[in-house]
Amino acid sequence: MSDATAGLTFVTCLLLGAGIGMLFGHLEAGGAIGLGLGIVSIALFRKNNK
């Protein structure tokens, strides 16, 4: 998978986490969860790319 796709996946995870956090009234917590999931997704994409 290309770096652009991995980056798009990261941003998507970040925005989804922030959106879910806004839904429950905790934007910071949702953003942190989205950030964590985004970093994990990038790590998985890079692992599969090697």
Image: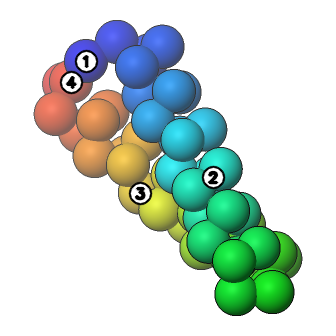
Please indicate whether residue 23 sits to the left or right of residue 43 in the image.
right
Judge whether residue 43 can be spotted in this image.
yes
The reply, left or right, for residue 28 in relation to residue 18 is right
Image-based side of 21 in relation to 5, left or right: right
Mark 1: which amino acid? Met
Figure check: 45 above or below 4: below
Q: Which residue is mark 1?
A: 1
Sooner in the amino-acid sequence: mark 4 or mark 1: 1
What residue does disc 2 label? 14
Does the CB distance between marks 4 and 1 fall below 8 Å?
yes
Amino acid type indicated by mark 2: Leu
Amino acid type of the residue that numbered disc 4 sits on in the rendered structure: Asn
- Residue drawn at x 54%, y 41% is 12
Instruction: Rate crowding at label 1 as few (under 14), some (14 to 19) or many (20 or more) other CA atoms within 10 Å.
Output: few
Residue 40's mark?
Answer: 3
Question: In terms of depth relative to the viewer, which is nearer, 1 or 27?
Answer: 27
What's under tag 3, amino acid-wise?
Val
